[in-house]
Image: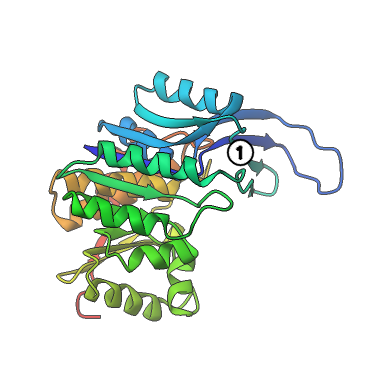
Amino acid sequence: MIITLTLNTALDKTLVMDELNVGKVNRVKSIRRDAGGKGLLVSKTLSALGSESVALGIVGGSIGQFILSQLDELGIANDLVEVNMETRTNLKIIDNKNGTYTEINEPGVPLHNMVIEEVFYTLQSHVRQGDSVVLAGSLPEGCRENIYADMITHCKAEGAKVYLDTEGEPLRLGIEKKPFMIKPNKFELASLCSCDPEDDIALLAEAKRLVKTGIEYVLLSLGALGAIFVSKNFTLRARGLNVPVVGRSGAGDAMTAAMVMAMEKELPPEECLRFAVASASAKIMVAGTQPPEIETVEELLPKVVITDMKGL
């Protein structure tokens, strides 16, 4: 079973405007509302691509009820802890005239440590040997930064594979516990080694260093440029695809979901990476943070070019 965990869930509200005029009154052309938070986006993508998961996390208030309702409508199993405080809202603003995409993300309300530990207990009650556990997203305000590290330790002890997608100190502390795979973007990886995020050689060196420390895989997402997939046995590069961009948010989560799904099926590394990049590309072709369409993913798969970088 694939288990996703989102400590900082959100309502993703996408506003489409003809033009965004800063400092002036703006009229919204259309609005889209989606259940958000990185782990939930992974679960939504898995469902769209034909795989099951259990979504864990925290929700609260009327927004929390909307999220629960959407997950139920999508047929996604969930066991989320409910609190009295309102779940945050993240705004995504699309400016059609200027072709810009602006995100305004709330930090999330501070939560009592007992709530965080209740989520940890819920995770412990679900995880079993052979499971794949996706720990994804930022932490709520005030949450201890080693929570992912402790979750990794527990899941590994139960015989589960842990996929970690976060940033900053939670990422650094999580890496120390050697998850099965991490999926940083170039900025998140650059922060670990204090290098320029545009320095491909330094980023690749850091990814290779991490797998030598005991992490099985590093999946480095490069946005429009594609992704690099690294293990002790291979270094693969997938070029990005030129597709029409409708909604950028959630592409990395679609990539994570597809990679987990492919690795669960034990596909060859090249096919895992191909599926991940095709899914991320398909995601940006749809609005808001809705998942990619499986038909689009299948259409894009043969267009993903994989290069062996082992000699670099």
Which quarter of the figure has residue 16?
top right
Measured as percent of width and height from the top left, residue 93 is found at 66, 42
Q: Quadrant of the N terminus?
A: top left
The residue at which mark 1 appears reads as: 88
Q: Residues within 10 Å of mark 1 (few under 14, many from 20)?
A: many
* For residue 310, above or below residue 304: below
Is there any visible trace of residue 278 in the rendered image?
no
Any part of residue 270 in sight: yes
Amino acid on which the number 1 mark rests in the picture: Arg
Q: Residue at x 40, y 40 (%)?
A: 119
Q: Is residue 94 above or below residue 69?
A: below
Question: Which quadrant holds residue 14?
Answer: top right
Seen at 39% across and 80% down, the residue is 202
Q: Position of residue 57 (x, y in %)?
A: 43, 38
Q: Residue furthest right?
A: 24
**Can you say which quadrant of the picture contains the C terminus?**
bottom left
- Front residue of 267 and 97: 267
Q: Nearer the viewer, residue 160 or 196?
A: 160
Would you place residue 159 above or below residue 211 in this image?
A: above
The residue lying toward the viewer, choosing from 58 and 38, is 58
Residue 166 versus residue 229: which sits nearer the camera?
166
Image point 24% across, 71% down: which residue? 211
Query: Mark 1: which secondary structure?
Result: strand
Q: What x and y, as percent, mark residue 306? A: 25, 61
- Apparent side of residue 165 relative to residue 235 in the rendered image (left or right): right
Residue 289 placement, left or right of 255: right
Q: Residue at x 27, y 75 (%)?
A: 208
